[in-house]
Amino acid sequence: MSDAQEGRSLGQLVASATSELSALVHEEIALAKTEMRQSVSRGVAGSGAIIVAGVLALFSLPVFSFALAYWLEAWWKIPLAVALAIVGALMLLFAVVCGLAAKSLLKKIQAPKRSIASAKESAAVLSNAKPHPRPGAGERPAPGPVSMSSADRETAVGAGSGGATLEK
């Protein structure tokens, strides 16, 4: 122990340790906030980059479609209108395949059966619960603590969980 801490009482040492622990917790929270801000800003930047990439890919689709149509026309000597129709049909075929794949994936979605069953079970338990009687509008609650007889205390202790209602 250092010379400065030797003359301090136990209460002073506990208070010092408590304040240092509190400061440490606050510093850890501040560090976590800073790290979260950095992560969020990186996530926002990454999301923005993905959105820009998607928009550029979407805009490039007509360009590549026309390029494919002109290639068909130039290399295979297909009339331009037929080449454009072929490219359009290929894109429509691709869209149909993607739509059918999405439909089959969406059919596999199921309701959360366990969560629904658990919620129904909880609702059934809560609907059978008896609320504690409350004083009416004109009645006043009994002042001060209510004394219990020894039989009531034994019933309360033997009731088990803390949320059980006691009835006589």
Image: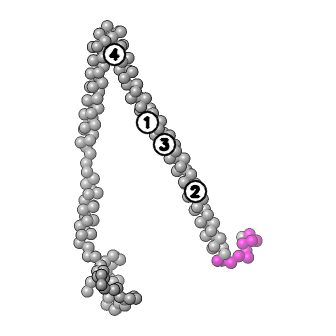
Query: Circle 4 is placed at which residue position?
Result: 69
Kind of residue indicated by mark 2:
Ala
SS of the residue at dot 4? helix
Q: Is residue 127 visible?
A: yes
Q: Which residue is mark 1?
A: 51
Would residue 92 be counted in the magenta stretch? Answer: no
What residue lies at 31% left-to-right and 85% top-to-bottom? 139
Report the magenta residues as a range.
2-11
- Among the two numbered marks 1 and 2 on one chain, the one whose residue lies closer to the N terminus: 2
**Cα gap from disc 3 to disc 2, whole angstroms:** 21 Å
- Asked whether 133 or 168 is in front, the reply is 133
Query: In the orientation shown, which residue stands out farthest toward the right?
Result: 3
Q: Is residue 115 above or below residue 127?
A: above
Residue at 62% x, 68% y is: 19
Residue 2 placement (x, y as % from top left)? 74, 69
Residue 168: where, in percent of width, then height? 26, 86
Decide: few, some or many residues near mark 2? Use Cα within 10 Å; few <14, some 14-19, many ≥20. few
What's the distance in space between the residues labelled 4 and 2, CA to CA? 59 Å
Q: Farthest residue to the front: give it.
A: 138
Tag 2, which secondary structure? helix
Please give the residue where the numbered disc 2 appears in the rendered image.
30
Residue plotted at (25% across, 59% down): 117
Q: Quadrant of residue 100?
A: top left
Q: Are marks 3 and 1 in contact (CB under 8 Å)?
A: no
Mark seen at residue 44: 3
Please give the label number shown on residue 28. Answer: none
